[in-house]
Image (cartoon, rainbow, N blue to C red):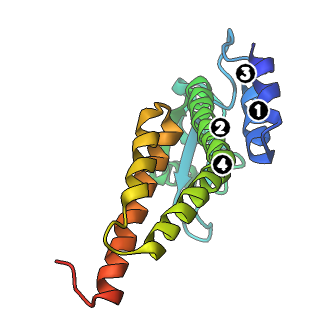
């Protein structure tokens, strides 16, 4: 089912195909294992400058009980009695992360991104249809305005009544846009033709 879903998304565009490909690869990757991944645990030692030696950060994949300067810092930059003084200045921390949580977070993020891109493609395809419909209605309204000012919205109300009777979402959007255009036209007429400022 995931491959059918990805197959349909691959046809929608390069942005969708990249996110789908990444999602597909993450789903194929093993999410659980018997032993922890060696990259999920590490000991990190931050050693400040000491005498002539510059500061340095050391990372090593070892167990928590061995997370100290003597086991992590290799090669040791100082010799002899300075080793203990150098190690006392180093701060070592055992770090653990969950790659499963990271993978799930990425999958959720890519899914949301894919849905948003799919919605954008939907709007891109539907908008020209709406513009074609609205262009026809605006031509009708402009011819009404040319006839006279006494009933400028006679045909507009008929158009709006017909659009109200249709129940799908596109017609509701069309109705709102027509109403807005009528208000804008009336405001333009009031301001530019009659020189009346609306309050």
Res. 6 image quadrant: top right
Camera-near label (2 vs 3) is 2
Residue 27 — which label?
Answer: 3
- Residue name at image x 82 percent, y 26 percent: 7
Residue at the spot of label 2: 114
Label 2 vs 3, first from the N-terminus? 3
Task: For the C terminus, give its image quadrant.
Answer: bottom left
* CB under 8 Å between discs 1 and 2: yes
How far is mark 3 from mark 4, CA to CA?
A: 37 Å
Is residue 73 visible in the rendered image? The answer is no
How far is mark 1 from mark 4, CA to CA?
A: 22 Å
How far is mark 1 from mark 2, CA to CA?
A: 9 Å
* CB under 8 Å between discs 1 and 4: no
Res. 9 image quadrant: top right
Q: Circle 2 sits in a helix, a strand or a loop, which is it? A: helix
Disc 4 packing (10 Å; few <14; some 14–19; many ≥20): few
Counting from the top left corner in percent of width and height, residue 28 is at: 78, 20
How far is mark 4 from mark 2, CA to CA?
A: 24 Å
Residue 9 — which label?
Answer: 1
In this view, the residue in front, 143 or 8, is 143
Label 4 vs 2, first from the N-terminus? 2
Disc 3 packing (10 Å; few <14; some 14–19; many ≥20): some
Residue at the spot of label 4: 129
Q: Is residue 82 left or right of residue 32?
A: left
Q: Circle 1 sits in a helix, a strand or a loop, which is it? A: helix
How far is mark 2 from mark 3, CA to CA?
A: 15 Å
Task: For the N terminus, give its image quadrant.
Answer: top right
Label 3 vs 1, first from the N-terminus? 1
Q: Is residue 82 left or right of residue 5?
A: left
């Amino acid at each position: 089912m995931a491959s059918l879903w990805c197959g349909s998304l691959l046809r929608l565009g390069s942005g969708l195909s990249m996110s789908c490909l990444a999602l597909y690869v993450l789903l194929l990757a093993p999410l659980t294992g018997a032993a922890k991944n060696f990259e999920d645990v590490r000991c990190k030692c931050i050693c400040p400058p000491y005498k002539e030696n510059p500061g340095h950060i050391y990372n090593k994949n070892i167990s928590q009980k061995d997370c100290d300067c003597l086991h992590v810092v290799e090669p040791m930059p100082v010799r002899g009695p300075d080793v203990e003084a150098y190690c006392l200045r180093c701060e070592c921390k055992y770090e653990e992360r969950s790659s499963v949580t990271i993978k799930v977070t990425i999958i959720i993020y890519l899914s949301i991104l894919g849905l948003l891109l799919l919605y954008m493609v939907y709007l891109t395809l539907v908008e020209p249809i709406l513009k074609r419909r609205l262009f026809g209605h605006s031509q009708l309204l402009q011819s009404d305005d040319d006839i006279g000012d006494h009933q400028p919205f006679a045909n507009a109300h008929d158009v709006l009544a017909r659009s109200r009777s249709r129940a799908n979402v596109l017609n509701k959007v069309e109705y709102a846009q027509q109403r807005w255009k009528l208000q804008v036209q009336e405001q333009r007429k009031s301001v530019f033709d009659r020189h009346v400022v609306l309050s």
